[in-house]
Image (cartoon, rainbow, N blue to C red):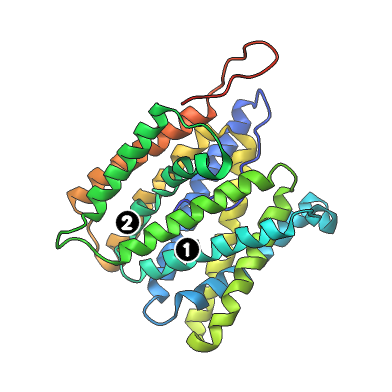
Amino acid sequence: MPKSQAPHPQTPAGAGFERVGLGITAAVASVFCFAVTDAIVKGLGDSYSAFQIVFFRYLFGLLPVFVVTWHAGGVKALHTRRPLFHAVRACLLFVALTCFFAALQRLPLAEAIATAFTAPLFVVALSRPVLGERVGPRRWGAVAAGFAGAMIIIRPGTDAFQPGTLLVLISAFSFALMVLTTRLLTRTETNAALLTYATVGAGLASVPFLPFVWQTPAGEDFVSFVAIGLVGGGAALLVIIAYRNAPAAVVAPFEYTGLLWGSIFGWVFWQEKPDAAVWIGAAIVALAGAYITHRETRPRPRAGPVAPRSGQ
């Protein structure tokens, strides 16, 4: 799924070629790391509950969080005036990741990742009722096209339909709500606060479920759990680096390289071969998402002292 759990910092105007190159490199590396995490999760899925996997993901993901917090100035960077919003955001992240990890136990890796890219479409569709933002006809058209592509992947009503896909859609919907909550929080909160409270909160949300699903990890599996936390947390840190050094319109399309990595890992480890419908639907979803990114990040002309509201 789209894994940009951290906020997207504004790129300084006039970012140089080297900084943009660093941003792109970090973006590609983050997507690769997230795909590695998804592959490890899928490998553990037959033996462990998604709740337990989420717990270890955030337990061992605290190390990269410490790095971000220290770099931001320590504990003072965690000051917040909106703890309730952080709690809601953490719960949404918990639901999104738990559903996605559960779906990985039931779906081919590439198909799960492709369906998860409906999250940006949900963001646009929900921005009007949640944030009151105006959405113009072109972006609505992109949303409609993207969901049509998702239906090609999912194929409801046919023998190819898999119920696990519904878990991915719930995950994407929850992730979209989390992104909208992030937009509200970025007005007053630091990147360190957003990353720290989401990590701690989502991890704590999994704790009540552990007594019912706990399986003591074997030695090799414990190493995998550590890897999920460190690699996944490191990927979130790379997302921050990517969006801090390059414009969102440049970085965001590289998220779709996750489809490539998902296909490679699925074929190498589980002999999964996405059919033509998955590739066609994924291409439509990716193009719709890229267009939405372009429309939302392009410079808008100013008429007088007040910027006009974007209608598209």
Q: Nearer the viewer, residue 305 or 90?
A: 305
Q: Is residue 49 visible?
A: yes
Q: Is residue 215 visible?
A: no
Whether 290 is drawn above or below 258: the answer is: above
Three-letter amino acid code of the residue under disc 1: Thr
Q: Nearer the viewer, residue 307 or 43?
A: 307
Residue that extends furthest to the left in the rendered view of this protein = 159
Q: Nearer the viewer, residue 258 or 96?
A: 96
Three-letter amino acid code of the residue under disc 2: Ala
Residue at screen point 49% across, 39% down: 252
Q: In which quadrant is the N terminus drawn? A: bottom left
Asked if labels 1 and 2 touch by Cβ distance under 8 angstroms, the answer is: no
Q: Is residue 21 left or right of residue 282?
A: right
Q: Secondary structure at mark 1?
A: helix
Q: Secondary structure at mark 2?
A: helix
Quarter-of-image position of residue 200: bottom right
Mark 2 sits on what residue?
110
Q: CA distance from mark 2 to mark 1?
A: 13 Å
Residue at screen point 43% across, 55% down: 172
Q: Position of residue 284 (x, y in %)?
A: 29, 39
Mark 1 sits on what residue?
37
Q: Position of residue 8 (x, y in %)?
A: 61, 42
Q: Is residue 77 left or right of residue 38?
A: right
Disc 1 crowd rating (10 Å Cα; few below 14, some 14-19, many 20+) is many
Q: Position of residue 42 (x, y in %)?
A: 39, 69
Q: Position of residue 165 (x, y in %)?
A: 31, 61
Total number of numbered discs in the rendering: 2
Q: Is residue 284 left or right of residue 240?
A: left
Quarter-of-image position of residue 80: bottom right
Of the numbered discs 2 and 1, the one sitting upstream in the chain is 1
